[in-house]
Amino acid sequence: MDRIKKNFGFGYMRLPMIGEEVDIPQTTAMVDAFLENGFNYFDTAHGYIDGRSERAIKECLSSRYPRDRYVLTNKLSSSFFKTREDIRPLFQQQLDACGVEYFDFYLMHAQSSRNFEHYRECKAYETALELKAEGKIRHLGISFHDSAEFLEKILTSYPEVEVVQIQFNYLDYEDDEVQSRKVYEVCRKFNKPVIIMEPVKGGSLANLPTEAKRIVDELHEGSEASYALRFAAGFEGVIMVLSGMSTIEQMNDNISFMKDFKPLDEREMGVIERIRKVFAALDLIPCTACRYCTEQCPQKIAIPNIFYVMNGIPLHHEWDAQARYDKVCTRFGTHASDCIKCGRCEQACPQHIEIRKLLAQAAEKYECK
């Protein structure tokens, strides 16, 4: 872990796109800027952008820089293996796709009560530890989406876990469902270094509601995203905060305040508390646009995009929800009413959102003209 140079990482989940393909020139420019400013941690997974994320690692990073210039994390996702025998071939596919011979960190992906037994039955942790002994993994970890109590169960069952990646931001800090604070405290109890994901909650904290924007503007310093990332990075034991950046402008902004990182001061923490109250009054759908739901949806419904439209009404007073909904349906070729209520989306959702119910509401609101 001492190879990590700074506490800010490049998440390869939300890369810049040109249509359905990764914008390679812009992603390459982002990689170069990231490394040139002293950062070196990259995070991907086999399913990100339908496999394009790993290939972009190879094209923009591993084929262009020596292996000692960067730290690379990948993950073992439950949807890609059915038996223990599937894991090693999948792992080799990941190495090949990324163009590397080993991963610095390899995480059991999105661990929760819904999939943990699958990992146990397939001896996924044991297989990963074998790969570590062979030098193909440097550190074994987990990414986690469940209760603090369930995290205790995993860390007790597998003390070999070296690092825990958790969802953590100032909105979810005291959320009863996400349990960011409680999960973080379990990590500290077991003395596990913490990696932060979703510090800006799928972009929600980088594009604040009108009332919250006014609060930030009162300080006349720092972007909206800066307060979210600096909040997450300021906790003891946090070794990395990931940001899934989609433009070079986002990259440059994040570099500007993470290069010489300073935790939030008392005045800034007061601003965070005021923003929390604004969000609490809006009752938003807690979607982070991770797109795990769309990966499982047999109808390929653009669920996060529909939820973005629905959230836009309370967030932005001038929002033309109907026009935006129609645009989403035209772009993706599916509607909320195409839902067959199979429930696979809800099984995959880290936020435990009642997706089927909300899609029915969207269909009734925007399609019954």
Image (cartoon, grey):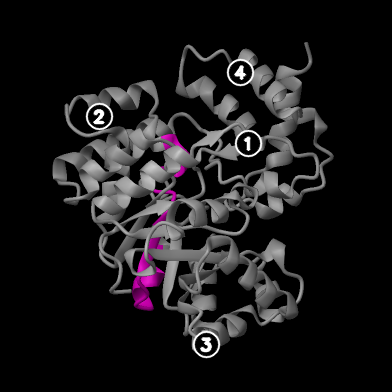
Residue under circle 2?
A: 216
In terms of depth relative to the viewer, which is nearer, 226 or 260?
Answer: 260
Q: CA distance from mark 4 to mark 1?
A: 19 Å
Residue under circle 3?
A: 134
Reply above or below: 264 against 225.
Answer: below
Residue stretch rendered in magenta on the structure: 184-204
Crowd around label 2: few <14 · some 14–19 · many ≥20 (10 Å)? many
Crowd around label 3: few <14 · some 14–19 · many ≥20 (10 Å)? few
Give yes or no for contact between labels 3 and 1 (Cβ–Cβ under 8 Å): no
Q: Is residue 160 something that shows in the picture?
A: yes
Query: Which numbered circle lies on residue 154?
Result: none
Choose mark 4 or mark 3, whichever is in front: 3
Q: Position of residue 231 (x, y in %)?
A: 28, 49
Residue located at (70% from left, 29% from top) = 332
Lateral position of residue 112 relative to residue 228, left or right: right
As shown in the figure, which amino acid type bears the numbered disc 4? Arg
Nearest to N terminus: mark 2 or mark 1: 1
Query: Which numbered circle lies on residue 20?
Result: 1
Nearest to N terminus: mark 4 or mark 1: 1
As shown in the figure, which amino acid type bears the numbered disc 2? Val
As shown in the figure, which amino acid type bears the numbered disc 3? Glu
Q: CA distance from mark 2 to mark 1?
A: 34 Å
Question: Of all residues shown, which one is farthest toward the front?
Answer: 64
Query: Which numbered circle lies on residue 324?
Result: 4
Q: CA distance from mark 3 to mark 1?
A: 37 Å
In terms of depth relative to the viewer, which is nearer, 224 or 177?
Answer: 224
Nearest to N terminus: mark 4 or mark 3: 3
As shown in the figure, which amino acid type bears the numbered disc 1? Glu
Crowd around label 1: few <14 · some 14–19 · many ≥20 (10 Å)? few
Reply above or below: 85 against 215.
Answer: below
Quadrant of the image containing the C terminus: top right
Q: CA distance from mark 3 to mark 2?
A: 50 Å
